[in-house]
Image (cartoon, rainbow, N blue to C red):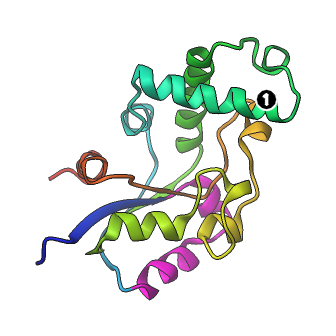
């Protein structure tokens, strides 16, 4: 094993499962040469979903701030939709939306391995906000949701798949979903 070999967690989220995109997602990951080393079909309970989305004040501020930027971009009033313009409060709401979303149906959790696996998977998956994901990415080809639409409907962005964002995050998430 070389120093660039990594493991990463990929989850086909409930909307990806409902839309029967498991095969397409696996195909794309295999086509670049990654190896599927573990997989589990499961239903996240509240504790697992909560633990999957660890929250810090910085995360709350960043997520809430991005949402406020969207409201400004579209000339909308966050008070009218969310009842607040406080970025931290909005971040807390989005955290709850994410937990509910992850629990809304079965998921396929997978561990993928290969050279630069984390970076490669993130590129293949595309932007978290599906409406701005580039064509050729999983989200860009199969999802159309936006943060502003999700917030207006008080739900998480339907973006088909989760992919770990760093070596540390991958290690924590793999242990959370698969144990040792």
Residue appearing at x 55%, y 17% in the figure? 88
- Between 64 and 37, the residue placed more toward the observer is 64
Q: Nearer the viewer, residue 22 or 95?
A: 95
**Farthest right residue in view:** 75
- The residue beneath circle 1 is 71
Residue 47 % position (x, y): 38, 31
Identify the residue shown where x is 52% and y is 54%: 106
Q: Nearer the viewer, residue 140 or 175?
A: 140
Residue 54 vs residue 124: left or right? left
Q: Is residue 99 magenta?
A: no
Q: Quadrant of residue 51?
A: top left
Majority secondary structure of magenta residues: helix
- Residue segment shown in magenta: 12-32
Q: Picture coordinates of residue 128 (x, y %)?
A: 58, 51
Q: Tell me: residue 58, above or below residue 115.
A: above
Give the x, y percent position of residue 13. Answer: 54, 55
Residue 105 pos. (x, y %): 57, 49
């Amino acid at each position: 094993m070389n120093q660039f070999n990594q493991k990463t967690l990929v989850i086909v989220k409930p909307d990806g499962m409902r839309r029967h995109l498991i095969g397409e997602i696996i195909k794309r990951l295999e086509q670049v040469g990654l190896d599927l080393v573990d997989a589990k079909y499961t239903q996240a309970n509240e504790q697992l979903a909560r633990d999957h989305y660890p929250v810090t004040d910085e995360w709350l501020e960043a997520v809430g701030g991005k949402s406020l930027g969207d409201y400004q971009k579209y000339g909308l009033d966050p008070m009218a939709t969310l009842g607040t313009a406080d970025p931290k409060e909005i971040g807390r709401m989005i955290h709850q939306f994410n937990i509910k979303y992850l629990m809304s149906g079965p998921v396929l959790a997978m561990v993928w391995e290969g050279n630069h696996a984390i970076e490669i998977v993130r590129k293949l998956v595309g932007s978290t906000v599906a409406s701005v994901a580039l064509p050729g990415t999983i989200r860009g080809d199969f999802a159309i949701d936006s943060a502003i639409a999700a917030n207006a409907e008080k739900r998480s962005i339907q973006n088909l798949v989760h992919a770990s964002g760093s070596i540390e995050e991958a290690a924590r998430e793999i242990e959370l979903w698969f144990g040792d």
